[in-house]
Image (tube, helix red, strand yellow):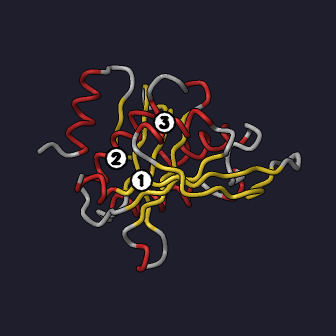
Amino acid sequence: MQGAGDSLILRAMIDHTIIYRPARPVDADQIHRLLTVMAEEEGALLLAPDEISPEDIRDRIRNATNRRNRFFHVATKDEIVLGMVALESGPYRSMGHVRFMNLAVDPHHRRKGIGRELTRVAMEWAYQTPSVAKIEIQLREANTAAFKLMQSFGFILEGRLKKHGRTPSGKDINELILALFVDERQNS
């Protein structure tokens, strides 16, 4: 059986321009820049760039690298980070079976399959990780492209959070909570 790392190597051999690989601590500054660019899009992120530092990202990458129950990968071209995906567990043991997904793609590189490939690799990892039963992702209600992408992987709408965020200009943002029940899909 091929592991997620094996498929990344094969994908890199096929696609010479974009490489999908595990994130490294040295990627943290570029990931922070990616999130900063995305934050400039009105209402694209809940976090403002000053609410997370490159060191916070480095710690998350180290946690994913040092623990088998977390996943953090990037898409790069010429060692420039174009996108990232993370599946991270929460702070409570009672929710140890749930992974929270974060997916980000540079606005200039969207609609090129990067988000789809990052999601595919993350899902492959989740299906091979026995402790993962559920994956949750929160999306802006207006982000129909991401909503459709997640639906194509089997995510379902679990709920809507009204006025969950607010843009710098004061506009209220609704969030959607989507979930994928990994253990149910494996048993079907």
Question: How many residues crowd mark 3 within 10 Å: few (<14), some (14–19), many (20+)?
Answer: some
Considering every residue shown, the one lying at the far right of the view is: 169
Q: Element under label 2?
A: helix
Q: Which residue is mark 2?
A: 123
Residue 50 placement: quadrant: bottom right
Q: Residue at x 33, y 56 (%)?
A: 182
Q: Which residue is mark 1?
A: 180
Residue 156, above or below 9 = below
Q: Are marks 2 and 3 in contact (CB under 8 Å)?
A: no
Q: Mark 1 and mark 2: span between their CA atoms?
A: 10 Å
Residue 95, given in percent of the width and then of the height, sits at: 43, 73
Task: Tell me if 143 is positioned left or right of 113 in this view.
Answer: right
Considering every residue shown, the one lying at the far left of the view is: 1
Disc 2 residue type (three-letter):
Met
Disc 1 residue type (three-letter):
Leu
Disc 3 residue type (three-letter):
Leu
Task: Tell me if 164 is positioned left or right of 101 in this view.
Answer: right
Residue 96, given in percent of the width and then of the height, sits at: 39, 72
Question: How many residues crowd mark 1 within 10 Å: few (<14), some (14–19), many (20+)?
Answer: many
Q: Element under label 1?
A: strand
Q: Nearer the viewer, residue 127 or 184?
A: 184
Residue 12 placement: quadrant: top left
- Mark toward the start of the polypeptide (2 vs 3): 2
Q: Which residue is mark 3?
A: 149
Residue 93, above or below 47 = below
Q: Mark 2 and mark 3: span between their CA atoms?
A: 13 Å
Q: Element under label 3?
A: helix
Q: Are marks 1 and 2 in contact (CB under 8 Å)?
A: yes
